[in-house]
Amino acid sequence: MAKTFNSLDKKDLVIQYTVKHTQKIDCGGAYIKLLPGGDKFESTKFGGDTPYALMFGPDICGSSNKKTHVIFHYDKTDDNLLINNNVGCEDNQLSHLYTLVLRPDNTFEVFVDNKSVRSGKLDDEFDFIGAKEIKDPDQSKPEDWVDEREIPDPEDKKPDGHDDIPMEIPDPDAAKPDDWDDEDDGEWEAPMVDNPDYQGPWSPKMIPNPEYKGAWVHPMIPNPEYEYDDSMYAVCKDGCTHVGFELWQVKSGTIFDDIIVTDSLEEAQQFAEETFFKKKDAEKEAYEAKEKKERAEEEAAMADEEGLDDMDMDDMDMGDEF
C-alpha cells in the first residue's frame, strides 16, 4: 500500500475491489485480505496461514452456498471472527464491485455494486464480546411446572367393539370365477379390501389442559463478564500495510481489479465511477452479444445434426424393389 492505515487514527476503513468469475464458477472463493507487517512483511511467504486484519469477498459453492465473507481479526482473543448473518453475493460471469466499510463507532457496512446489502453494529453481528445477559444459573424449571397445552379427555371412553373391527374385509363385490375348479385350484377366497368401518387405533380426544401455565422462560440476569470494547473496530491498530488475495477454486478464471483502500467512502465511490461503472455497461453488452452468438452457433449445430439423422432414417427406409 502507498500509505499505512492505522486504526488508532479513528478514521473509517474502506476496502473495495471488483471480482469477475469468467469460468462460470461452481465452487470457490475470491477474498481480499488486509495485512499488517510493514517493512518486515515477506510477500514470498504469504499464504492461508498468514495473519490478517480482515478478509472480505464472495464465497460460492453450489446453489445453496452463495455469500460474501466478512471476517475481522480480534487481537484480544486472537480469533478471526466471521459475520453471524448471511451476506449475499453475485455469481454470474460479469464484474461486480465489493465494498466494506469499518467505522470507529464500531459499525460496519457492506456494499455490492454500490448497493448496501448489510450493515450493523459489530457487537450485534460478530462475536467480539459476550452477551449482555445470560440465563440465571441459579434458576431452573420448577418440577411442578405444567407446559402441556392439551391433555387426553378423561371422560372420553373407547367404544365397545372398537378393537374388533378388522383393517381389511373380503371384497363384497368379488365373485368366484366361472372357470374356478375347487379341486384343482383350491377353495376360492375373495380378495381382501380396506374396511371402510376401520378407524385405526383408538386414542382419546384432546382437551385444553386446565393446569397449563405456558412455556417456561428461563430468567435472564446481567452477564458479570460482559464488558463493552470501544476498540472492536481497531483491526489495524499496529498499522496495515499490504493487501493480498486468497483463492480457493475448483476452476480457475477469476479476475481482480479496481482495488482501493482508503478512509473515505466518498473517495471509494468516486474511484468506482471512474473505473468499474465506466466499463460496466459495455462489458454487459459484450457478454450478452457473445452469449447470443454462442446460442446461435449451438442451435445451428443441432439443426445440422437433426438433418443428418433424418437423412440416415431415409436411407434405412429405402429398400430394393423388384
Image: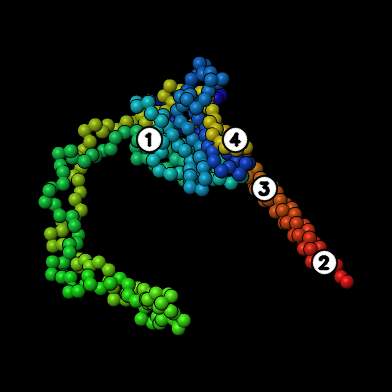
Give how far apart the Cα atoms at labels 3 and 4 are.
18 Å
User: Distance between the Cα atoms at labels 2 and 3?
Assistant: 47 Å
**Where's the N terminus, which quadrant?**
top right
Which residue in the protein does label 4 denote? 256
Where does label 1 land, which residue?
106
Query: In the rendered view, would you say 136 is above or below 263?
Result: below
Q: Is residue 114 positioned above or below 75 on the image?
A: below
Amino acid on which the number 1 mark rests in the picture: Asn
Residue at label 3? 287
**131 shown above or below 190:** above
Q: Answer with left or right where residue 187 lies relative to residue 49.
A: left
Q: From mark 2 to mark 1, how far is it between C-alphas?
A: 82 Å
Q: How is the image coloured?
A: rainbow
Element on which disc 1 rests: loop
As helix, strand or loop, the secondary structure at mark 3 comes to helix
- Where does the image place residue 38, in percent across and percent down from the top left? 50, 19
Q: List the residue tagged with mark 2.
A: 318
